[in-house]
Amino acid sequence: MPREKNSTTKSGWRFKLGSAMLLLSIVGPLVFIPLLATLGLSGTLTASLSGVVLVGAELLMVAAVAVMGKDGYEIIKEYASTLLNQYGPRDEVSKLRYSVGLIMFIVPVLFGWLSPYLHGYFFNYSSEWTMTLAISGDLIFLTSLFVLGGNFWDKLRSLFIHDAKVRFSAA
């Protein structure tokens, strides 16, 4: 028989403490690891301390779930799921949006593949634009996955399934 969520779960001290611990476990590494990098420590020490921060964050996350309990964890999970579904890609997209998404998907891949071969003709790798072009291409590629919609994710996923079959609709 499913348990009913306690109405005082959100207002209780366990939920509040667990939520604060969960938030700290997520934000902590984002703050402390860059801070460690700016301290001027040796690379080995910085990497070691960064690892300690990440392991500590994971342990804090597990402890947060234990403190808030199953009901509190379910509330957080429902909230995150609602938030992600709200901003996730739509399943069906228009033909124009799909075409634009395919261009956004293919151009960075082709650019990354061809740029070493075209280096002497069009690109100068000693240029300060090299990193900017690489990051821009990656961002365009990742954005294309959202522009293409949810059905494209299924098509990509089927590439990694041995028994997947193509079935064309009669359109």
Image: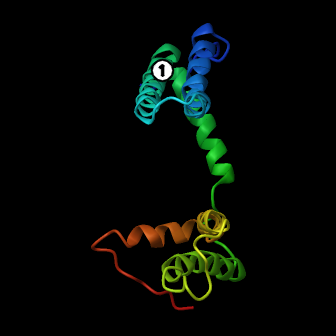
Name the foreground residue: 119 vs 17: 119
Split into 4 quadrants, where in the image is the C terminus? bottom right
User: Height in image: 33 above or below 122?
Assistant: above
Q: Residue furthest bottom?
A: 170
Q: Residue furthest top?
A: 13
Examine the rendering and report whether any part of residue 76 can be seen: yes
Look at 51% across and 83% down and name the residue there: 114
Q: Residue furthest left?
A: 162
Label 1: element kind:
helix
Q: Crowding near pointer 1: few (<14 within 10 Å), some, many (20+)?
A: some
User: Height in image: 84 above or below 138?
Assistant: above
Instruction: Name the quadrant containing residue 83.
Output: top right
User: Height in image: 17 above or below 84?
Assistant: above
Where in the figure is residue 161, as x and y percent of width and height?
A: 32, 69
Q: How is the image coloured?
A: rainbow
Look at 66% across and 66% down and name the residue there: 136
Q: From the viewer's perspective, is 1 left or right of 144?
A: left
Q: How many marks?
A: 1
Look at 58% across and 75% down and name the residue there: 108
Where in the figure is residue 55, as x and y percent of width and height?
A: 41, 27
Instruction: Name the quadrant containing residue 27.
Output: top right
Where in the figure is residue 36, as x and y percent of width and height?
A: 55, 29
List the residue tagged with mark 1.
60
Split into 4 quadrants, where in the image is the N terminus? top left
Q: From the viewer's perspective, is 160 left or right of 5?
A: left
Amino acid tagged 1: Leu
Where in the figure is residue 151, as x and y percent of width and height?
A: 54, 70
User: Height in image: 153 above or below 75?
Assistant: below
Instruction: Name the quadrant containing residue 58.
Output: top left
